[in-house]
Image (tube, rainbow, N blue to C red):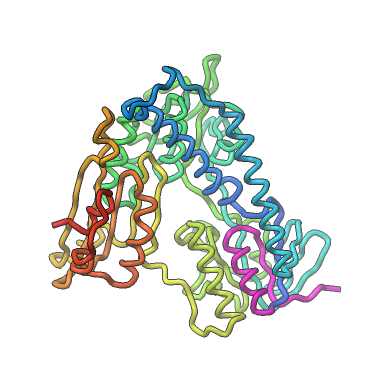
């Protein structure tokens, strides 16, 4: 006999957990089915452990500048990769436990099992058969490995978090945020890093000025940049892993090759066909603005939808879905416009709203750009002079701010507040009328002319 619920959630990642707990707050009898560790990609092999590694890399950069602030440090500062890994992994394990306790506190049933849809409203979870009028698909994604010769010699971002020691020579393949972030961490902690990417630039969804700034910063940090690198074929030699590109150029040897070329949805084996749920040509579950699939009562949020693969997006979409379905908030849904995002490069780069190119394509001559480039006060007394770049994209006579782009120290923390301003429809005059906080880098955003 099937066990009956109001709401069944396939996947215990950020979106699934947020939606399940919000639904339970409204009184829905809810169960989360997750085969792996609670927290999904973000907590276990994504945002959280990545940010720990980013922090470690940031400390390494700070040690280089500390001497010029008068600190007497040894010439060679040693870093214990394994010690950091142990502390990081212990922290993640604590978070897994916290997520389980949160579910229990909200009276959400947690079922540790493989889950698949038998039909649109029936889920097989291990040996259990569960039914519900409402089902959420939130199984997330996994790293891509290309179908190329020797590709299995490389690791992915998942494998990066399993490394027990820092590799000496590393190739990172990819031009997106994961590639840029992990290349920066590895280099800061002492590895020799080569970044292979397909096009002329990295982070191609970001404003061109920000792309250029990131490339310049990586080069200054000693990362070897290899643009227009196509179809690497890998082979193992006595000296390590070597690569031959489509142009027959040879590279290596490397101790590790890291694939960071994108992610694919985890849709295989979860019964989408049995439920009649449609996917697009890349395998992502298609939904409308209400996260509704083509099947009534079956929804999807998070990376499996292929829309803005960011943890806060999955959480926000999940909570709004529960508000609408179980909280009586008719029409409640996530607005995917003007979502801020940050790449934790060194220094970080953040964006919210339209890039200059997007704005000019949509609004033509109504676009006016304000931008600034400077060395932050922190680096005023250091030999190292990384540049901070900022850009405001405005539209129309009222100069509505349609985009804010920041590359520099503190960009990650600065952008959140300015994202609120964009969401509220602020104009350049509103920025101008805001008294600056001095001395900060952020003040540049309200003093540009």
Residue at image location 56% in from the left, 78% down from the top = 323
Residue at image location 55% in from the left, 21% down from the top = 236
| Nearer the observer, 191 or 262 | 191
Say if the magenta span includes residue 193. no
Residue 224 appearing in the image: no
Percent across and percent down for residue 163 are 59, 31
| 76 to 173, vertically: above or below | above
> Residue 386 lies in what quarter of the image?
top left
The residue furthest right is: 1
Quadrant (top left/top right/bottom left/bottom right) for the N terminus:
bottom right
| Nearer the observer, 13 or 264 | 13
Percent across and percent down for residue 106 are 70, 69
> Residue 248 lies in what quarter of the image?
top left
| Nearer the observer, 221 or 277 | 221
On screen, residue 418 versus residue 231, left or right, reads left
**Number of numbered markers:** 0
Quadrant (top left/top right/bottom left/bottom right) for the C terminus:
bottom left
Residue at image location 59% in from the left, 50% down from the top = 43
Residue range highlighted in magenta: 1-27
Percent across and percent down for residue 420 are 36, 66
Residue at image location 45% in from the left, 18% down from the top = 76
| 61 to 9, vertically: above or below | above
Say if the magenta span includes residue 7. yes
Percent across and percent down for residue 189 are 47, 29
Residue 348 appearing in the image: yes
| 300 to 195, vertically: above or below | below
| Nearer the observer, 193 or 381 | 381
On screen, residue 14 versus residue 116, left or right, reads left
């Amino acid at each position: 006999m099937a066990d009956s619920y109001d709401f069944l959630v396939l996947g215990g990642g950020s979106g699934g957990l947020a939606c399940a707990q919000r639904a339970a707050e409204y009184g829905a009898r809810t169960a989360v089915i997750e085969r792996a560790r609670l927290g999904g990609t973000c907590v276990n092999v994504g945002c959280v452990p990545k940010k720990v590694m980013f922090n470690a890399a940031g400390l390494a950069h700070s040690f280089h500048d500390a001497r010029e602030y008068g600190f007497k440090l040894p010439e060679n500062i040693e870093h214990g990769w394994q010690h950091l890994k142990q502390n990081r992994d212990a922290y993640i394990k604590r978070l897994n436990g916290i997520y389980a306790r949160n579910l229990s506190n909200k009276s959400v049933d947690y079922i540790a099992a493989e889950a698949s849809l038998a039909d649109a409203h029936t889920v097989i979870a291990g040996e259990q058969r569960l039914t519900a009028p409402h089902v959420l698909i939130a199984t997330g994604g996994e790293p891509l490995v290309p179908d190329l010769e020797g590709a299995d010699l490389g690791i992915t971002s998942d494998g990066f978090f399993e490394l027990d020691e820092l590799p000496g020579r590393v190739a990172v393949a990819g031009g997106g945020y994961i590639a840029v972030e992990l290349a920066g961490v590895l280099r800061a902690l002492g590895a020799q890093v080569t970044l292979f990417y397909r096009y002329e630039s990295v982070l191609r969804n970001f404003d061109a000025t920000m792309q250029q700034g990131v490339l310049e910063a990586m080069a200054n940090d000693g990362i070897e940049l290899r643009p227009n690198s196509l179809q690497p074929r890998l082979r193992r030699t006595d000296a390590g892993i070597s690569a031959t590109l489509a142009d027959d150029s040879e590279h290596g040897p490397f101790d590790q090759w890291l694939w960071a070329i994108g992610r694919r949805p985890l849709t295989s084996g979860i019964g989408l066909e049995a439920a009649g749920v449609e996917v697009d040509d890349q395998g992502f579950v298609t939904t409308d603005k209400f996260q509704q699939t083509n099947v009534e009562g079956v929804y999807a949020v998070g990376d499996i939808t292929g829309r803005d693969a960011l943890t806060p997006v999955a959480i926000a979409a999940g909570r709004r879905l529960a508000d609408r379905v179980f909280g009586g908030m008719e029409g409640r849904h996530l607005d995917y416009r003007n979502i801020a995002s940050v790449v934790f490069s060194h220094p970080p780069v953040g964006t919210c709203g339209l890039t200059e190119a997007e704005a000019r394509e949509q609004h033509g001559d109504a676009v006016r750009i304000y931008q600034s480039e400077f060395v932050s006060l922190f680096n005023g007394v250091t030999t190292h002079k990384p540049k901070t770049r900022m850009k405001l994209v405005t539209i129309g006579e009222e100069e509505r701010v349609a985009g804010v782009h920041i590359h520099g120290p503190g960009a990650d923390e600065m952008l959140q507040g300015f994202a609120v301003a964009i969401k509220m429809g602020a104009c350049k005059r509103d920025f101008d009328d805001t008294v600056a906080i001095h001395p900060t880098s952020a003040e540049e955003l309200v003093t540009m002319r």
